[in-house]
Image (spheres, rainbow, N blue to C red):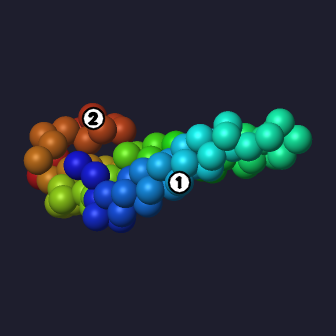
Amino acid sequence: MVSAGGVALIIVGLLVLIFGFMIFGWALSLPTLFAGQYLIFGGLIVAAGIVLIVLGARTRGKNKEKPVPLSTCNNCGTRNPVTSEFCGKCGIKNA
């Protein structure tokens, strides 16, 4: 699930993307002398919008899983989950 910050990044990315396409379209109507600069500028803004959308989609909410309680092996001192029947290191049966 995407976090609230991720949704905000996606929205900002979409707005930046729209702005970039507007500059790109506007540059196509300019004389050739000036169009190249604005085409590059519009393309960079479109790329920034895409990056923001991807970053927003990759953010995740906080992990809701609870940590597993651990116990210590009496033989070797290794920390094992309370639910394990045997020690993960030495193999002795947990008490």
Q: Give the structural element (helix, strand or loop) at label 2.
A: loop
In the rendering, at what x and y percent does residue 2 appear? 28, 52
Residue 64, image quadrant: bottom left
Q: Position of residue 40 (x, y in %)?
A: 75, 42
Q: How many angstroms separate mark 1 from mark 2 (CA)? A: 62 Å
In the rendered image of this protein, does residue 20 appear above or below residue 64?
Answer: above
Q: Are marks 1 and 2 in contact (CB under 8 Å)?
A: no
Q: Position of residue 28 (x, y in %)?
A: 67, 37
Q: Which residue is mark 2?
A: 91
Compared to 58, does 62 lie above or below? below
Q: Secondary structure at mark 1?
A: helix
- Residue 47 visible to the viewer: no
Identify which residue is drawn at 37% across, 57% down. 11
Disc 2 marks a residue whose amino acid type is Gly
Number of dots carrying numbers: 2
> Residue at image x 23%, y 49%?
1
Q: Position of residue 79 (x, y in %)?
A: 32, 54
Q: Is residue 76 left or right of residue 65?
A: right
Q: Tell me which corner region of the image, top left, top right, bottom left or bottom right, holds residue 36.
A: top right
Tell me the quarter of the picture where residue 68 sits.
bottom left
Residue drawn at x 53%, y 54% is: 19
**Residue at horizontal 55 percent and vertical 48 percent from the top:** 22
- Left or right relative to 90: residue 17: right
**Is disc 2 surrounded by few (<14), some (14 to 19) or many (20+) residues within 10 Å?**
few
Q: Nearest the camera: 21 or 68?
A: 21
Q: Amino acid at mark 1?
A: Phe
For mark 1, what is the residue? 19
The disc placed on residue 95 is: none
- Closest to the camera, between mark 1 and mark 2, is 1
Query: Tag 2 or tag 1, which sits nearer the N-term?
Result: 1
Relative horizontal placement of residue 41, taking residue 82 as reference (left or right): right
